Amino acid sequence: MQRVVIFLISSAILVVMVSYFSTYVPPNDPFNETNSSSTFSVSGISQSKFAKMKLRHAALSPTPYDVGIFGNSRALNISAKDIDRGACRFFNFSIGGESLRASAALIEQLSAIKKVPRVIIVSVDHFELQMYNNPFFISAWARLLHFFDDLGAGLSSGASLREITTVVWRTVWTQILSFQRMFEYAFLANTFRSMFGFATDQTEAAKVYLSDGSRRSNIASTNIPPVLSATNAQILPWQLKHDLGRIAAAKSAGVETIILYESFLHPTSSKYFDDNPSAHATRSREALLSTCEELGMKCITSKPKMDPEMSWSDASHPPRSFLGPYISELIAPYTPVCRS
């Protein structure tokens, strides 16, 4: 019996220690605006911690940013220089590996502390990708609250038993993955090093950031990536509509303009899906457009003409040389007051 007690106590101590290390956020703010051209590496720091660092930076800012972009790695490379909006204060709140659901959660948290940007741009993963995972950066408690919120939205929308089961399973699966990530060696080791002032692992050259929250990627590009394969339906239309409502609620916190755009695919993949659209992508796109119209948000799914010779890192990550000017044009009518 004594051995069992010792084992249980030791296991509890181990879990508490690992939990602390996995949630520890370095005390310094790397997004120091006094040196906007400097870069820094976050190698070994999880995206969950990085999201908390961005939230903390926004909370410490004396005033909300004029312009903020939300999304994942498909928008993470866009900097203030890329959108060229003069005197506008810009910050990239994108979090790699997340989906629109994380953008909604992040906007809600910024709204709660009255630091949500005046103009919001949200990158929505191309609907043929059907990426709609639950957010990883929020706490287990917040994840549970989101589950009950989803459950209520599903029941009020007449969701089927299969759809409700999907919501339950995704919540459980996200929690399992989050627990597994707590024990990943790279993140634990680098957390330990940063806590005690040792150098962290800087081998991941792709994870180099600017102080405006954007990332500079050193990933090699190729002109013609393979055409993307079709995916199965993952997005529940009623859940998408509910998340759009959560984003629209930011207007009560001082947001003046909310723009959502469907992310781009390489011209070869884009042409393939234009000619062969899936039923679930079409359904998701229609849900986005109809809900945006109801909620007074500007949502764009049309695709501008792209240079077929432009270099892409893969078929779903547009180069910033294209995306920066595109976003700049989107927000131009809403940012005249901070244009130098």
Image (cartoon, rainbow, N blue to C red):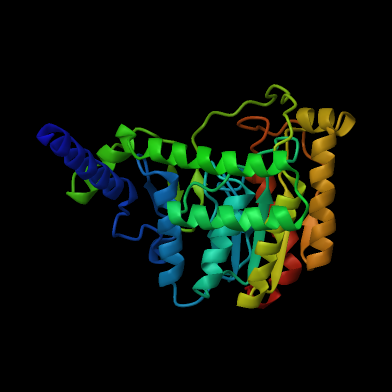
> Which residue is painted at 73% across and 44% down in the image?
236
Q: Is residue 33 visible?
A: yes
Q: Residue 48, position in %: x, y?
A: 43, 49
Q: Residue 303, position in %: x, y?
A: 81, 44
> Which residue is painted at 13% across and 37% down in the image?
6
> Which residue is painted at 47% across and 42% down in the image?
175
Name the one closer to the observer, 57 or 183.
183
Quadrant housing the N terminus: top left
Q: Looking at this rendering, what residue extends furthest in the top direction? A: 226
Name the one closer to the observer, 67 or 150.
150
Q: Looking at this rendering, what residue extends furthest in the front direction? A: 1
Image side of residue 16 versus residue 313, left or right? left
Image side of residue 272 versus residue 181, left or right? right
Q: Is residue 225 depicted above or below 334 in this figure?
A: above
Q: Residue 301, position in %: x, y?
A: 81, 48
Q: Is residue 302 visible?
A: no
> Which residue is painted at 27% across and 42% down in the image?
15
Name the one closer to the observer, 25 or 241.
241
Total count of labels: 0
Image side of residue 15 versus residue 245, left or right? left
Q: Residue 181, position in %: x, y?
A: 39, 37
Quadrant housing the C terminus: bottom right
User: Can you tell which quarter of the image residue 27 is in?
Assistant: bottom left
Q: Looking at this rendering, what residue extends furthest in the right direction? A: 275
Image side of residue 139 versus residue 82, left or right? left
